[in-house]
Image (cartoon, rainbow, N blue to C red):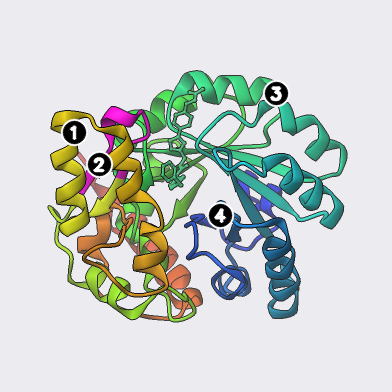
Amino acid sequence: MNRVCEILGTEYPIIQGAMARIATAELAGAVSNGGGLGIIAAGGAPVEWVKEQIDKCRAITDKPFGVNIMLLADNVDELVDLLIEEKVAVVTTGAGNPGKYIPRFKEAGIKVIPVVANVTLAKRVQRAGADAIVAEGCEAGGHIGETTTMAMIPQMVDALDIPVIAAGGIADGRGLAAAYMLGAEGVQVGTRFLVAEECIVSQPYKEMVLKAKDSSTVATGRFTGHPVRVLKNKLSRQMLELEKTQDLEEFERLGTGALSRAVLQGDVEHGSVMSGQVAGLVNKEQPAAEIIREMFEEAEKIYDARAAVVKER
Ligand code: TUI
């Protein structure tokens, strides 16, 4: 059995990306029912809301699922207490170093899988006791690091003993197979699950992903130290304009409530439409379970067909 499946308690070594405001119990439950690991994104939401989502997810699925903690949120300590009390199966983290929380999760029997974007932080969380890491390349949507998935995965694999789960730029069986070739033992997929039938994101957001092409995303806010990849729209153009003056106050004003505007209200011109570079590969709304099955079937076919390329001379 695959080391990642063993840690996650899943049939397939695939984690659904934690998309703030978007990854609710509906999507997480559907992904877990489909044999992957569904994730509820706590984002900056109140602890009570997260508790409701956990209850809801447990009503949708008997299978394991996880909760993601965004470490820039101001209620992280409270959230950690909740997740320990609820004994969720897996915790993933983003946008920081979760090191100081890892011992308490481990004591509670919770698997911890930090999402990281560089080898230095990956080594640090391995030392702190992480069970695996998600190595997220800058092709990913949302808050990103500097390095691509292609360059990062083998460097992570060389530097770590714990399993590496690849993220950023993976939306079909080809990306999945490629991640394995680089040494990953699992994948995390966000953008393709945005258009899952069970995903509650607004229809205009889904349509924008479905219509996107290779050059449709851009990273905004590099000068803030927290670059974020989004689909290009009026808001991203305004934000890029602010890079010239580096007006942080105005940047933050523009960003306030921007994700909700796109996710809940469907305003994809003035809202933040976070998405990975693979949006151009995502062309069909379908059930989460079908996405998982298709990806692994396609990857298997590739292995069978391409083995000849390296074996036959
Ligand atoms: O965290 C993510 N993706 C996210 S978080 C998010 S919410 C947000 N919105 C606006 C600004 C910032 C966050 C949307 N998408 N992925 C994992 C990830 N972690 N990507 C990059 C990092 C990261 C970057 C620098 C983690 C730590 C870090 O510096 C700390 C260190 O010690 O290296």
User: Does the residue at mark 1 contact the one at mark 2 (Cβ under 8 Å)?
Assistant: yes
Mark 4 or mark 1: which comes first in sequence?
A: 4
Query: Label 1: which residue?
Result: 243
The three-letter amino acid code for the residue at tag 2 is Thr
Real-space Cα separation, disc 4 to disc 3, in angstroms: 23 Å
User: Does the residue at mark 4 contact the one at mark 3 (Cβ under 8 Å)?
Assistant: no
Residue in front for this viewpoint, 50 or 109? 50
Horizontal relation, residue 124 to residue 268: left or right: right
Mark 3 or mark 1: which comes first in sequence?
A: 3
Mark 4 or mark 3: which comes first in sequence?
A: 4
Q: Position of residue 220 (x, y in %)?
A: 25, 41
Real-space Cα separation, disc 3 to disc 2, in angstroms: 32 Å
Query: Label 2: which residue?
Result: 220
Q: Quadrant of ligand 1?
A: top left
Mark 2 or mark 4: which comes first in sequence?
A: 4
Real-space Cα separation, disc 1 to disc 2, in angstroms: 8 Å
